[in-house]
Image: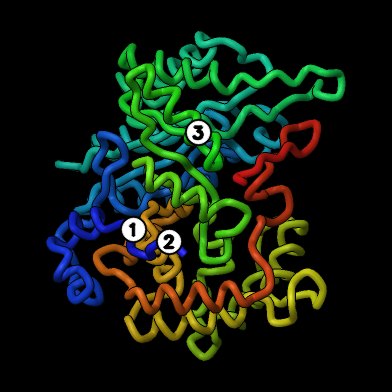
Amino acid sequence: MPSIYHSTTLLLLAFGTTADAFSTASNAPSSADVTQVGSLTVPTIGCGTIAWSTDFGRPNPELADLVSTASANQNGVFFDTGERYGSHAKTALGMGWGETECLVAKLLKENDAAEKDPTKAVVATKFTPSPWRTTVESVVEACEESRKRLGVESIDLYQIQMPDIVKPLRKFGFDKSYDKIYWDGLAECYHRGLVQNVGVSNYGPTLVTECSEHLAKRGVPLASNQIAYSLIGRHNGAQQTLDTCNELGVKVLAYYPFAMGLLTGKYTSAMPELSAEHALTSSLTKSRRSKFERKDLERYANGDGKSIPAGGVAPLLSTMERIANDRDKTVAQVALNYIICKGAIPIPGSRTAAQYDDNMGALGWRLTESEVTEMENVADNLGFAFDGAGFKRSNAKFVGYGMETWSLT
């Protein structure tokens, strides 16, 4: 088992010296809980925007409140978006490219005009591998479009969204990989000054090492690798990927940090008499998720007696709830802090200022090594691991003609 506190540098940055890291981390807030992603200094928790939809023709006013709240955070603000993020209806049909990038830019511009001294937001976006993108220049052109939509001279962090897996004509023998060409495209964007840092997503240990070495030959450091990672999502190469990235100096950005809500316990606040696991079961019946997602999440929550033992995630939620109560934190904050302790930056999605504030409550303190070990032991004994729900998977993407998969192993 690798060291739980590989992120010694992070703790030094947030709390001062190694000697007082553990004694200080449990209660006292730090003046700044930040870390480095390449040349960027960012808060140790980001904010995902994939759920920021413009389906109704105008942004949800709650998003403006979120951006205003985030811009006042002393640790700064770090938004993660992508060119393929857009209105849910259009995205499902393969359209809506760039909509969320435009929305992020609009909200930030309006907030800058309204606030006297707003914190400058760090914004990361993503290039999507596609069958018609087969050249270095296709990456540069996509980057230029994202840069214009975001309204910036240079993108803070430009990432490849996934390995080159979209191959609609694979069964006819057309399955050439363009990963290395995309890497050269990132390098070209970097050297032209279109981006300040480059990253990848959903790369396992082998591919991320190859990419890092390939870019290094072009004089370009690989800053980040975004993967699905949580207490119940450390299997199928995720933990090995995190360990490899930590060794390479590549910062892991963790999506699905709550395992699509299974690890939040966020519905207990309005019903304090309910335990986190009972509240989770109640919340799933009221969820706006698709019926396919709900069906899978209910199996994780309660178990099915087959692939998931009876009781589902309840034993882990009970442990997390006890630790949260001892620390006067929420279950969701414990879930995020766990990821920070492992050396990664969680990127939970937020749609309201209240959600953002609760997520930021995971900053300024650290779980103890014994708490981390206890939760990992309980999670490992659940008898299952989280792979996503419905069409939202941790190792696959719906690409119009079907599901395409990747592997971190």
Residue closer to the observer: 163 or 65: 163
In this rendering, position of residue 8 left or right of residue 345:
left
Image coordinates of residue 274 in percent, x first then y, are: 55, 87
- Circle 3 packing at 10 Å, graded few (<14), some (14-19), many (20+), is many
Quarter of the rendering containing residue 121: top left
Could you say which disc has been placed on residue 82 in the image? 3
Amino acid type at circle 3 is Gly
Q: Amino acid at mark 1?
A: His
Number of marks drawn: 3
Image position of 16 with respect to 277: above or below: above
Instruction: Using the numbered discs, state the Cα–Cα distance from disc 2 to disc 3 in whole angstroms.
Output: 32 Å
Furthest toward the front, the residue is: 1
* Residue 354 appears anywhere in the view: no
The disc, 1 or 3, on the residue closer to the chain's N-terminal end is 1
Furthest residue to the right? 172
Please give the label number shown on residue 2: 2
Q: From the viewer's perspective, is 136 left or right of 22?
A: right
Residue type at the position of mark 2: Pro
Tell me where residue 150 appears, x and y as whole percent: 39, 26
Residue under numbered circle 1: 6
